Amino acid sequence: MLEEIAIENLGVIRSARVPVGAGLTVITGETGAGKTMVLTGLGLLMGGKADPATVRPGASSAVVEGRVRVTDRPAVAQRVDDAGGQVDDDGTVVILRTVAAEGRSRAHLGGRSVPQGVLAEIADDLVTVHGQSDQLRLRTASRQRAALDAFAGPAHAELLAQYRDAWAERSALQAEIDDIETRAGERAREAELLRLGLAEVERVAPQPGEDVELTALVARLGNVEELRVAAQLAHDAVAGDEAAEPQENAVVSVDRARRALESVAGTDPQLARLAERLAEVGYVLADVATEISGYVEDLAADPAGLESAHARLAELGTLTRSYGETVDDVLAWASDAGLRLLDLDDGGERLHASIARRDELDAELDRLGTAITASRERAAAELATAVTDELRGLAMGGASLVVDVERAEEPGPWGVDVVTFSLVAHAGAPARPLGKGASGGELSRVMLAIEVALATAAVDGTGQVLPTFVFDEVDAGVGGKAAVEVGRRLASLARRTQVVVVTHLAQVAAFADVQLVVTKSSGAGPGDGPDAAADVAAVTVTGVREVTGDERVRELARMLSGQEDSDAARRHAVELLESSVVGR
């Protein structure tokens, strides 16, 4: 429920605080005073598009702040928490919207900056706005179907949910079937290429790291003499013929040094430790000399082996040129290609399985569609009766609503029906679609009648919490007795949920629980001094105040005759207030 809206520098409103009470709140005032700006501010709070042109002349930005009670709306409270905002201890949350004159807009929810879209997400649970544009939307078949579905109740909503789930699955399956069928030739060609590649890999049978090992072998066999000379020189240096060149024999030199240190090791422990390290070096040198000697003995020219290695590398090269830079890459490709081939070969089986499942879903959709049609037909008769009864109370006694449910040419995610609202304007008149046979005033009353019927069904059927209903001059084109009945129906709706109405009609305003008057005067720009007033002269300033008692009588008298001090108008205003109390 809305509790309060504060507005600064929006349109003609410099600063206004709008208290919104429970039940029916009406907003009245002279034409052009700025009543619509109050609803513009509410629209901004609910995530509406920001228009820099609405910023008050001379101001850098417009600010709208609202406080909403969400204790009975856990989904909204959860969304506030998800956005990082906080719900106050009293169960309310503050929504803030700032619109800069240069065009930037910012939104805050529960003290946390959020995208504009977050406010739009929670708007459907909080507020439903009706104005002339909404009446136009009521003329469309989709909106009429949605209204009938809402009236039909929770069991009908469950059928629709099952139907939409089945429709979504069926649509996805059909897309998969179409893909398999249209790409059958392409998939066959891809499978053939994969089979050829896998056959070639299988024929060559590469082993992991084989190309690296063969490259090393080719380098070794191709340079046998250079390797032999280098190895022999290294062996001679480490452990060569001691008699021939003792000065170049590392083993002998290290051993001589070890013995020298050991001869005096008893005198100095440090030399003893160094002698031990030289002994370790000697062991290592001896091992290296043995390994080099073995390497030289094994090293032999192998022309046949070299040719075989070159041939194998060439064979592997045919694979690496096509399927990867290395043999390991080729093996990885082969693994992926095998899985892809299994998937391609399975296409026929998947196609049969998908078609079978699609046929099952078609049967399910047919069953659910038939049930939805029957549910809509029952709800259509009940809604037509409920709205027709309301229209009688709205001074359209000869009028009636006809709700037709007919088979659509093609089924859709909503079912298999086309819903049409038609209005019989008076007894004996033909039923004509709302889009063709209803005037603006008639549409206003039909809209109100439908909302009352929907709200009654929702509360009586499920006890659900309804959103705040906002009506922007929904009584346009209505007067006299019909205006009184409009006010009575709005008051009836307000017993079930919060209702806010912008109206020019005293007959409607008399039924309000809270009446707010928008007034205007002239002055300088916001916060400007006397010098600035000369630049922004005669800027309209709008304020909002609640009227009670005699002030409310004066406002109703003004609305009735334009003369708030007229005794006759004041008597009529008092009579309206008294009759509205009795009429509830």
Image (cartoon, rainbow, N blue to C red):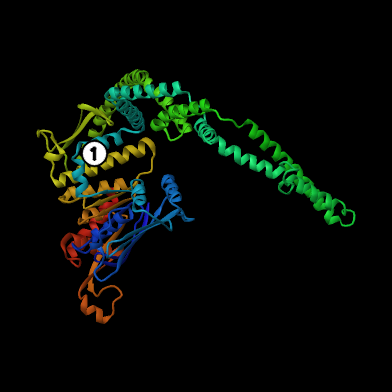
Q: Residue furthest bottom?
A: 531
Residue at point 85%, 51% (across, down): 262
- Residue 557, given in percent of the width and then of the height, sits at 20, 62
Closer to us: 570 or 325: 325
Q: Residue 292, located in which quarter of the rendered image?
A: top right
Query: Would you say residue 32 is visible in this rendering?
Result: yes
Closer to us: 420 or 25: 420
Q: Residue furthest right?
A: 266
- Residue 519, given in percent of the width and then of the height, sits at 24, 66
Residue at point 32%, 37% (across, down): 457
Closer to us: 581 or 527: 527
- How many numbered discs, if any? 1
Query: Would you say residue 394 is visible in this rendering?
Result: no
271 relative to 439, above or below: below
Q: Amino acid at mark 1?
A: Arg
326 relative to 569, above or below: above
User: From the viewer's perspective, is 37 left or right of 425?
Assistant: right
At label 1, counting other C-alpha atoms closer than 10 Å, the crowd grade (few under 14, some 14-19, many 20 or more) is some
- Residue 381, given in percent of the width and then of the height, sits at 24, 30
Closer to us: 508 or 519: 519
Give the residue number, with chain letter if any, for mark 1: 143
User: From the viewer's perspective, is 137 left or right of 172?
Assistant: left
444 relative to 221, above or below: below
- Residue 532, given in percent of the width and then of the height, sits at 25, 79
Residue at point 78%, 49% (across, down): 277
